[in-house]
Image: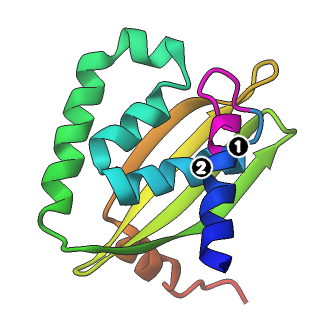
Amino acid sequence: MKHLIAILLFFLSSPLISQENIENDSLFINEFLQTYKEEGISKSLDFLYSSSDWIINENSEDIQNLKAQLIQITTHIGKLNGFKIIKEINLKNHLRAYSILLLYDRQPLRFIIVLYKPKNSWQLQTFQFDTDVSDELINSMNLSWEF
């Protein structure tokens, strides 16, 4: 019964997350991650980029190249086991940055997503991904000579 209620709540809340009027950035990020997990890279990036007419209209070839790069990387790092939002930065409710760790079998992958709210709804400003999370972690452990 609990599962049925959870499924109903998901489907009832989905129309509230329209791509034309994204009022809640965390719902948008969660929808993106669910789409990534359930429907794959291409559909999730389409969802993400569809929030900004500026990006999708000017960079459609770049988006296709980005999808191809991400697909190529993920085929070599195993199965996706989950994801965690590891950092979130909010600038006066108009700019938000998310650092998201994707837990693959071989190694983690990191997404950095920046959302911008010029008026009433959030739109994608920046999307990046990398596999350098371990390197950054090691570098952060270097000794500081300040006493």
Q: Is residue 1 left or right of residue 143?
A: right
Q: Where is residue 51, by image quadrant?
A: top right
Q: Where is residue 44, by image quadrant?
A: top left
> Residue 21, how many percent across, how many down?
70, 24
Mark 1 in CB contact with mark 2 (< 8 angstroms): yes
Magenta stretch, main secondary structure class? loop
Residue at x 74%, y 27% (from the top left corner):
117
> Residue 67, how many percent across, how many down?
24, 39
Q: Secondary structure at mark 1?
A: helix
Residue at x 28%, y 40% (from the top left corner):
42
Q: Is residue 41 above or below residue 86?
A: above
Q: Amino acid at mark 1?
A: Asp
Part of the protein shown in magenta: 14-22
How many labels, in total? 2
> Residue 137, how many percent across, how many down?
46, 78
**Which residue is nearer to you in this view: 146 or 45?**
45
Q: Quadrant of the C terminus?
A: bottom right
Q: For residue 25, which numbered disc appears in the image?
A: 1
Q: Residues within 10 Å of mark 2 (few under 14, many from 20)?
A: some
Magenta region includes residue 110: no
Q: Residues within 10 Å of mark 1 (few under 14, many from 20)?
A: many
Q: Secondary structure at mark 2?
A: helix
Q: Which residue is mark 2?
A: 29
**Which residue is nearer to you in this view: 87 or 8?**
8
Q: Is residue 136 above or below residue 68?
A: below
Residue at x 68%, y 68% (from the top left corner):
5
Magenta region includes residue 17: yes
Q: How many angstroms separate mark 1 from mark 2 (CA)? A: 6 Å
> Residue 97, how many percent across, how many down?
64, 47
Furthest-front residue in this view: 1
**Which residue is nearer to you in this view: 47 or 71?**
47
Q: Amino acid at mark 2?
A: Ile
